[in-house]
């Protein structure tokens, strides 16, 4: 099999380059050591950590800030498995 481009790494730079090359008509292969594309930022770094920050803000809102406006919520708890 012949390829016009072989991209090493399926992280944010690699998969974007591969997609663009394919859009331009190239036959592209990606070599990735992990079982999925996306890299650290997409899978365990930037994006998941931002989702956890958003969840923690919602928890803080439910536990305290809403009470300042007369909204009292009882039994608020964290389900870390779902958050992850």
Image (cartoon, grey):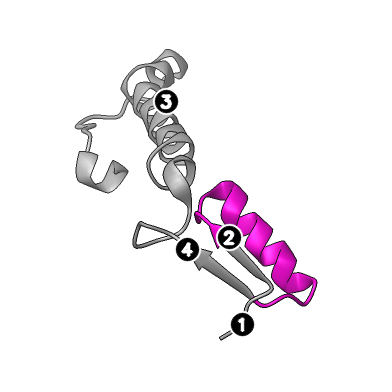
CA separation in Å, label 3 and label 4: 38 Å
Q: Nearer the viewer, mark 3 or mark 4?
A: 4
* Residue 9 horizontal/vertical position (percent): 50, 54
Please report the residue visible at 41 percent of the width from the left and 40 percent of the height from the top.
48
Q: Quadrant of the C terminus?
A: top left
Q: Nearer the viewer, mark 1 or mark 4?
A: 1
Q: Nearer the viewer, mark 2 or mark 3?
A: 2
CA separation in Å, label 2 and label 3: 39 Å
Provide the residue designation for mark 3.
Answer: 57
**Residue situated in front as seen by the camera: 51 or 13:** 13
Of mark 3 and mark 4, the one earlier in the sequence is 4
> Around disc 2, counting alpha carbons within 10 Å, would you say few (fewer than 14), some (14 to 19), or many (20 or more)?
some
Look at the numbered disc 4 and give the secondary structure of its residue: strand
Of mark 1 and mark 3, the one earlier in the sequence is 1
Look at the numbered disc 1 and give the secondary structure of its residue: loop
**Residue situated in front as seen by the camera: 84 or 45:** 45
Please report the residue visible at 42 percent of the width from the left and 36 percent of the height from the top.
45
**Residue situated in front as seen by the camera: 19 or 69:** 19
Query: As displayed, is residue 59 above or below residue 44?
Result: above
Which range of residues does the magenta coloring cover?
7-27
- Residue 68 magenta-highlighted: no
Mark identifier at residue 2: 1
Mark identifier at residue 7: 2
| Residue closest to the far bottom | 1
């Amino acid at each position: 099999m012949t390829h016009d481009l072989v991209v090493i790494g399926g992280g944010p730079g690699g998969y974007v380059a591969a997609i663009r090359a394919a859009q331009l008509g190239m036959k592209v292969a990606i070599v990735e050591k992990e079982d999925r594309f996306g890299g650290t930022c997409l899978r365990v770094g930037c994006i998941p950590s931002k989702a956890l920050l958003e969840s923690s803000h919602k928890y803080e809102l439910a536990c305290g800030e809403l009470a300042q406006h007369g909204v009292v919520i009882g039994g608020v708890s964290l389900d870390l498995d779902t958050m992850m």
